[in-house]
Image (cartoon, grey):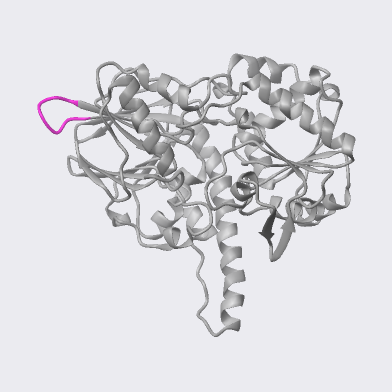
């Protein structure tokens, strides 16, 4: 089997792995590169011919694993996109939202280009391209073994990261002995709200594992919730608002669940929470439509829902409603996308409020290098937002215990369940993190490890 690392290699976005097995050509993941400086990476040519790909496996709905699907279809892919039912349902609103962003960005860049005598800018893909993606989905259940043909079998296991997230087990036989490769997808943290804990395979010849938090430990859930409560109370006491950049899929739903639990426990009063993301509203509906993915605690929670013992949740749909939030000077929590502050409505809220010392910004997710969120977290005194330099005067909190990713110990625990000595490929992590995690795996578990370069090929 030929395995080539086309994305997510020594970086934390754009995951894409190319396989050639017994005359079949397969992609595992088809992710978008995110953060500043990735425009060329997304708009460049694929290292493969899209029309030649037979199957694409998608482990979960985050765009850094799936956001290039419309481009692949645009360039000729007509095979099957294999994923779980919940992932397919999440991807529909997410890809349409992404297409609208691509089209709006291209329209804005075209106006700018034409004024300087340059050619118009074409969007990465359009809504029409997303229309062509939907019929190609083939959904599969967790824990069931399926045959792809040509001596290849596969199975999805619950990765416990977001709704519908999966670890992919793939068996192949191109010699006397059948071999197995496991693609971890993004591995969830034990005890995350709403969804079940990750299910861990126990045998493999080869493992491709993410390393997003491969050099860090998360705060405990209790400490993180305590810090969230304290941050909200302090901010309201100072007369400001709380702004939470959040990913529409997973993190927003977890936050709403936690905030409602805090009201039920009388740790917060019925605070006003504004969900300023039409996409997050659509995603929340998808979550509620898939209770089969919930853990026991979440099932009990949703079966006893009491609106008198929950936050006052406001869905902010129009741009005008979003702009009006900036006239509210104190006492509200605003959850808005994007999670790394590189787009979406959160940028407007930061432009109007980041300079206000009475306000707070609470980061609850990973901030990739090159993003606005990362610059704020790293302590920038001034940041450039929507054409203006904005002073960072608000209180900034980084509460990584809400991460949907396993941390360093969680990743090691996941790997330690494997029998024997599988060969491990470490991906989807910043270079220094992936390299240090590789050394940790070798030292603790004795496994042979690789930290692939982009484009690197291995014969398995």
Name the spot of residue 347 as percent of width and height, x first.
69, 54
Is residue 304 located in the magenta-colored stretch of the structure? no
Q: Is residue 18 left or right of residue 88?
A: left
Quarter of the image for residue 140 reads: top left
Residue under the image location 44 percent in, 30 percent down: 166
Asked if 231 appears above or below 75 in the picture, the reply is above
Q: Quadrant of the C terminus?
A: top left
Judge left or right: residue 184 versus residue 459: right
Can residue 138 be seen here? no
Q: Main secondary structure of the magenta part?
A: loop
- Taking the view exactly as shown, the residue that stands out farthest to the left is 176
Q: Residue at x 69, y 31 (%)?
A: 255
Quadrant for the N terminus, please: top left
On the image, the x and y values in percent for residue 16 come to: 37, 45
Instruction: Write the residue at 55% across / 56% down.
Output: 99
| Image position of 243 (left or right of 67) | right
Residue that appears at 61% across and 32% down: 400
Q: Is residue 123 above or below residue 290?
A: below
* Residue 421 vs residue 149, the one in the foreground: 421
Residue closer to the observer: 127 or 437: 437
Rendering coords of residue 102 (x, y %): 55, 60
Specify start and end residues of the magenta stretch as a single range.
Answer: 172-178
Q: Position of residue 266 (x, y in %)?
A: 83, 18
Residue 173 belongs to the span the image colors magenta: yes
Q: Which of the two residues, 81 or 380, is positioned nearer the viewer here?
A: 380
User: Which quarter of the figure has residue 211?
Assistant: top left
């Amino acid at each position: 089997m030929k395995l080539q690392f086309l994305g997510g290699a020594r970086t934390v976005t754009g995951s894409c792995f190319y396989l050639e097995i017994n005359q079949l050509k397969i992609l595992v993941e088809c992710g978008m590169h995110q953060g500043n400086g990735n425009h060329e990476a997304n708009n460049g040519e694929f290292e493969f011919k899209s029309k030649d790909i037979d199957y694409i496996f998608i482990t979960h709905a985050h765009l850094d694993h799936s956001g290039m699907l419309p481009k692949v279809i645009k360039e000729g892919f007509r095979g099957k996109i294999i994923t779980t039912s919940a992932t397919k349902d999440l991807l529909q609103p997410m890809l349409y939202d992404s297409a609208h962003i691509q089209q709006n960005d291209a329209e804005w860049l075209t106006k700018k280009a034409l004024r300087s005598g340059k050619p118009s800018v074409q969007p990465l893909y359009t809504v029409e391209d997303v229309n062509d993606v939907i019929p190609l989905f083939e959904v599969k259940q967790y824990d069931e073994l399926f045959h792809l043909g040509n001596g290849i079998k596969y199975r999805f296991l619950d990765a416990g990261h977001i709704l519908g997230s999966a670890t992919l087990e793939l068996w192949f036989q191109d010699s006397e002995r059948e071999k197995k490769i496991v693609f971890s997808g993004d591995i969830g943290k034990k005890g995350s709200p709403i969804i079940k804990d990750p299910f861990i395979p126990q045998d493999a010849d080869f493992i491709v594992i993410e390393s997003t938090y491969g050099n860090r430990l998360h705060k405990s859930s209790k400490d993180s919730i305590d810090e969230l409560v304290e941050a909200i109370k302090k901010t309201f006491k100072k007369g400001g608002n709380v702004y939470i950049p959040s990913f529409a899929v997973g993190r927003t739903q977890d936050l709403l669940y936690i905030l409602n639990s805090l009201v039920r426990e009388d740790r917060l009063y019925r605070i006003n929470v504004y969900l300023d993301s039409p996409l997050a509203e659509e995603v929340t509906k998808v979550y509620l439509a898939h209770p089969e993915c919930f853990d026991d605690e979440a099932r009990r929670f949703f079966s006893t829902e009491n609106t008198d013992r929950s936050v006052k949740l406001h869905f902010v749909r129009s741009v005008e409603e979003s702009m009006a939030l900036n006239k509210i000077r104190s006492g509200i929590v605003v959850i808005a996308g994007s999670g790394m502050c590189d787009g979406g409505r959160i940028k407007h809220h930061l432009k109007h409020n980041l300079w206000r010392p009475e306000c707070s910004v609470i980061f609850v997710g990973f901030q990739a290098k090159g993003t606005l969120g990362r610059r704020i977290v790293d302590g920038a005194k001034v940041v450039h937002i929507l054409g203006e330099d904005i002073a960072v005067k608000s209180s900034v909190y980084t509460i990584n215990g809400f991460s949907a990713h396993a941390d360093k110990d969680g990743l090691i625990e996941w790997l330690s369940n494997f029998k024997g000595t599988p060969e491990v490929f470490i991906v989807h992590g910043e270079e220094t993190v992936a390299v240090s995690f590789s050394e940790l795996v070798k030292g603790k578990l004795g496994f042979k490890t690789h930290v692939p370069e982009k484009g690197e090929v291995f014969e398995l």
